[in-house]
């Protein structure tokens, strides 16, 4: 579905803010009848615009005190090398996001760890042992003034 109208965008904005809103409340916020609102939400889900619903967790309450972004350069630029790296990152619990990017490096990771010592272990004993990794640069998150990940 690529033809989103203003009502669809308003529905998506409200669901992004509160994915647990009842259909009745959502319909009232949007200005639709509950049945029309439900049909639109179901169509957004069916078409894949809405891929799912998630709980937004507080990392600090889950023992995460260290967040960093890590740029990763590979020494070999083949599909097989990329697939091997992506498979290694899929199994790394500290890696919360893995993005193949353009520029001077191939990947950008979002890494969450309990603390600096735990991150150092991950950096050395996990990232540092993946075949084909040529460069690593860590950007430590000091504070996040805006974070809209769901």
Image (cartoon, grey):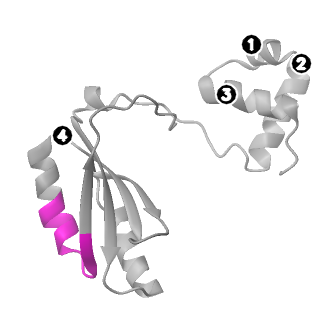
Direction from residue 133 to residue 108 in the image, left or right: right
| Of callouts 4 and 3, the N-terminal one | 3
Q: Residue at x 17, y 74 (%)?
A: 129
| Of callouts 2 and 4, the N-terminal one | 2
Q: Residue at x 37, y 63 (%)?
A: 90
Disc 2 from disc 1: Cα separation: 10 Å
Disc 4 from disc 1: Cα separation: 38 Å
| Of callouts 4 and 1, the N-terminal one | 1
Task: Estimate how packed mark 2 is, as few (under 14), some (14 to 19) or many (20 or more) residues with alpha carbons within 10 Å.
Answer: some
Q: Look at the numbered discs 1 and 3 and tell me whether their residues touch, using CB distance below 8 Å.
A: no
- Residue 7 lies in quadrant: top right
**Residue 15: image tag:** 3
Q: Residue at x 28, y 82 (%)?
A: 132
Residue assigned mark 4: 114
Residue 67 x %, y %: 27, 42
As helix, strand or loop, the secondary structure at mark 4 comes to loop
In this view, which residue lies farthest toward the front?
A: 104
Compared to 146, does 2 lie above or below? Answer: below
Nearest the camera: 113 or 133? Answer: 133
Nearest the camera: 103 or 119? Answer: 103
- Residue 37 lies in quadrant: top right
Residue 111 x %, y %: 30, 50
Disc 1 from disc 3: Cα separation: 11 Å
Direction from residue 21 to residue 147 in the image, left or right: left
Q: What stretch of residues is rendered in magenta?
A: 123-135
As helix, strand or loop, the secondary structure at mark 1 comes to helix
Residue assigned mark 1: 25
């Amino acid at each position: 579905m690529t033809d989103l109208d203003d009502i669809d965008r308003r529905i998506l904005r409200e669901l992004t803010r509160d994915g647990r809103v009842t259909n009745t409340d959502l319909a009232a916020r949007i200005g639709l009848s509950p049945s029309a609102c439900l049909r639109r939400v179901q169509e957004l889900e069916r078409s894949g615009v809405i891929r799912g619903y998630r709980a937004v967790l507080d990392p600090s309450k889950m023992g995460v005190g260290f967040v960093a972004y890590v740029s990763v350069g590979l020494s070999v630029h083949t599909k097989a090398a990329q697939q091997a790296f992506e498979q290694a990152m899929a199994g790394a619990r500290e890696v919360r996001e893995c993005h193949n990017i353009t520029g001077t490096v191939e990947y950008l990771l979002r890494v969450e760890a309990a603390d600096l010592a735990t991150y150092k272990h991950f950096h050395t004993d996990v990232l540092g042992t993946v075949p084909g990794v040529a460069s690593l640069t860590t950007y430590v998150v000091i504070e996040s003034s805006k974070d809209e990940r769901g």
